[in-house]
Image: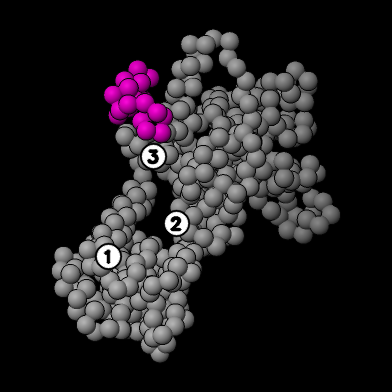
Amino acid sequence: MIDDKSANVLLVVEDDEGLQRQLKWAYEGYQVHCASDRSSAIEVLRAYEPAVVTLDLGLPPDPDGTGEGFATLEEILRLKPDTKVIVATGHGAQESALRAIALGAYDFYKKPVDIDALGLIVGRAFQLSALEAENRRLESSSDEKVLGSMISAAPEMLKVARTIERVASADVSVMLLGASGTGKELLARAVHDKSKRKGGFVAINCAAIPENLLEAELFGYERGAFTGAVKSNIGKIELAEGGTLFLDEVGDIPLPLQVKLLRFIQERVIERIGGRSPIAVDTRIVCATHQDLEAMIAAGSFREDLYYRLAEIVVAIPSLAERPGDAVLLARHFLNLFARDLNPAVKSLSPDALAAIDGYAWPGNVRELENRLKRAVIMSDTKSIGAADLDLGRSSDDGVSINLRAAREVADRRAIHQALTRTEHNISGAAKLLGISRPTLYDLMKQYSLGG
């Protein structure tokens, strides 16, 4: 990230001392440092972290060639990928200019130097650098985070967040309903973090453990309780003493074990497998499932009495497709996260990528989006992720509403949310994207209570 000390620093890499002095004089509004070769350029880069660099490709020991210049360009961008590098090319050196841009240079200028023309290029580079730095600052301190690490600006998710915050302090069982990949465990942790419980958060995926082992995982067992039980083992319920037990995919618990779980909820005591002494446990239960438990109750595969014990508060989590604008918001978050750790050269999502993300149905929800962004960042050899890098298919058709007025309102809300998210809440940009005037957009935002 460009900070205050580097925001107005310009590095001039040029072996002609006369031209160095000329350029330094021309840019007295900036903090200008000069270097005449690769090693001194890198030394200045490390010391002052310049936002913008002008680079002559003809550097010693190869002043008549471009090899040393391109090596310098690559090293600058490897060490500080957000640097705006402007390369100098001679007459007829279009090929070098194109190669430099492909390697990540911001722009190029032709020799002999036109100070005024170069000044415009340098000025734009500083403006873009400052804008990118501000965007990164805003993203790192985004107020679109809800419940700690949950990121959303969609009213549907903000409603869920308010519900979680209200019920967290009440010691009741909470059931989270939503499709796979919607963030159920993240919300379960939020329930625990916002509660008054001092114990730990213990999670178990009931669908991931074989039926014959699930009881031992939940309730624990005594030494000798079965073949292989060479020592006593504490179960997940006991481990959650004083805290929260999260039962993910609770619909996969077999009926015989449902009876034992119900008994624990009613009496707040357990017995380990092979044990004879009841053990009192104080834990709050939060559960989640993507299954239709009411249909399972009707089919006899889930106990109705257990359901009502677990579902004192039910929170339905919308799919990513039902959260207008959130896909782009999350995509930017994941891009920054993965680029920092996996491929710092990646800087942005291209306009066609943003459009593809916006239009895709995301059947795998947030988890699918996260996985696609991670793969694209790892595999990318350019600064910007395109739609093709994400390998997205066509978005699904949501169907047509019978009520045209309601359909129009839904479409308006979705389009406004998406435009505001894609333009990072720039009203002029969003209005332009929507093809309407700023006053019209303000009126629509006021009509639908979408904020300012």
Q: Which residue is drawn at 54% across and 9% down?
A: 403
Sequence order check, earlier mark of 2 and 1: 1
Q: How far apart are marks 2 and 1 (CA)?
A: 25 Å
For badge 3, the amino acid type reads: Thr
Give the side of residue 67 with respect to residue 28, left or right: right
State the residue in front, 194 or 36: 36
Residue 106 lies, with reference to residue 437, above or below; the image says below
Residue labelled with disc 2 = 347
Classify mark 3: helix, strand or loop: loop
Q: Tell me which secondary structure the magenta stretch mostly adopts.
A: helix
Q: Which of 108 and 276 is in front in this view?
A: 108
The CA distance from mark 3 to mark 1 is 29 Å
Residue occupying image coordinates x 24% and y 84%: 17
Q: Mark 1 points at which residue?
A: 118
The quadrant of the image that shows the N terminus is: bottom left
Left or right position of 271 against 64: right
Seen as rendered, the residue at the extreme front is: 92
**Magenta-drawn segment:** 431-452
Q: Position of residue 338 (x, y in %)?
A: 51, 56
State whether residue 6 appears in this view. no
Q: In which quarter of the image is residue 302?
A: top right
The percent coordinates of residue 446 (x first, y second) are: 32, 20
Rounded to the nearest angstrom, the CA distance separating label 2 from label 3 is 16 Å
Q: Quadrant of the C terminus?
A: top left
**What amino acid is found at the position of numbered circle 2 in the picture?**
Lys
Q: Callout 3 environment at 10 Å: few (<14), some (14 to 19), or many (20+)?
A: some
Q: Which of marks 3 and 1 is in front?
A: 1
Residue that appears at 29% across and 57% down: 124
What x and y, as percent, mark residue 352?
52, 44
**Does dot 2 land on a helix, a strand or a loop?**
loop
Which residue is denoted by mark 3 in the rendering?
423
Instruction: Please name whichever residue, 248 or 3, is drawn nearer the observer in this view of the structure.
Output: 3
